[in-house]
Image: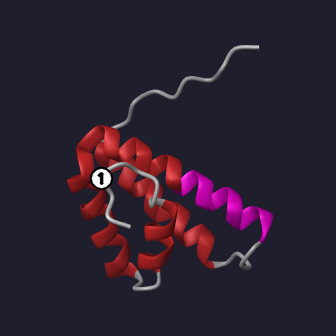
C-alpha cells in the first residue's frame, strides 16, 4: 500500500480550504467525531499554509476567517496551536 502524497498547493487555494472547513465545523456538535475530523483537517491545512507562505499567510487566513465570523478565532487558534511559529 502506497502512502498518499499530497501535491503542494498555492496559498490562495489553501486559504479557501480553511474557510470551507470552518463553515463545515459551524454545524457540528462539540465533541463529535465529525468535528474532530474537521479540526484535524483544519490543522493540516494550517500546516500546508505555513509551508506555502509562512506565518504571515496563516495570519492572513485567520484575519479573513474572523472577518466572516468572529467565532472562528478560537477554533483556528486551537487547531493551529502546534504549528511552529503560530502564537497560540
Per the image, label 1 sits on a secondary structure element best described as loop
Describe residue 59's horizontal placement relative to residue 44 as left or right: left
The stretch drawn in magenta includes residue 36: yes
Quadrant of image for the C terminus: bottom left
Residue at horizontal 74%, vertical 63%? 34
| Quarter location, residue 72 | bottom left
Residue 28 point in image, percent of width and height: 70, 75
Residue at horizontal 74%, vertical 79%? 29
Residue at horizontal 71%, vertical 78%? 30
Instruction: State whether residue 83 is above or below residue 87.
Output: above
Quadrant of image for the N terminus: top right
The stretch drawn in magenta includes residue 59: no
- Magenta region, main secondary structure: helix
Q: Residue furthest top?
A: 1
Residue 3 point in image, percent of width and height: 66, 20
The answer to which of 87 and 2 lies nearer the viewer is 87
Residue at horizontal 51%, vertical 73%? 75
Residue 46 point in image, percent of width and height: 42, 52
Q: Which residues are magenta?
A: 32-42
Amino acid at each position: 500500500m502506497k502512502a498518499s502524497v499530497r501535491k503542494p498547493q498555492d496559498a490562495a487555494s489553501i486559504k479557501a480550504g480553511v474557510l470551507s472547513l470552518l463553515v463545515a465545523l459551524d454545524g457540528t456538535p462539540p465533541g463529535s467525531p465529525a468535528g474532530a475530523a474537521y479540526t484535524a483537517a483544519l490543522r493540516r491545512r494550517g500546516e500546508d499554509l505555513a509551508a506555502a507562505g509562512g506565518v504571515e499567510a496563516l495570519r492572513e487566513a485567520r484575519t479573513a476567517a474572523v472577518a466572516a465570523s468572529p467565532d472562528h478565532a478560537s477554533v483556528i487558534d486551537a487547531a493551529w496551536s502546534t504549528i511552529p511559529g503560530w502564537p497560540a
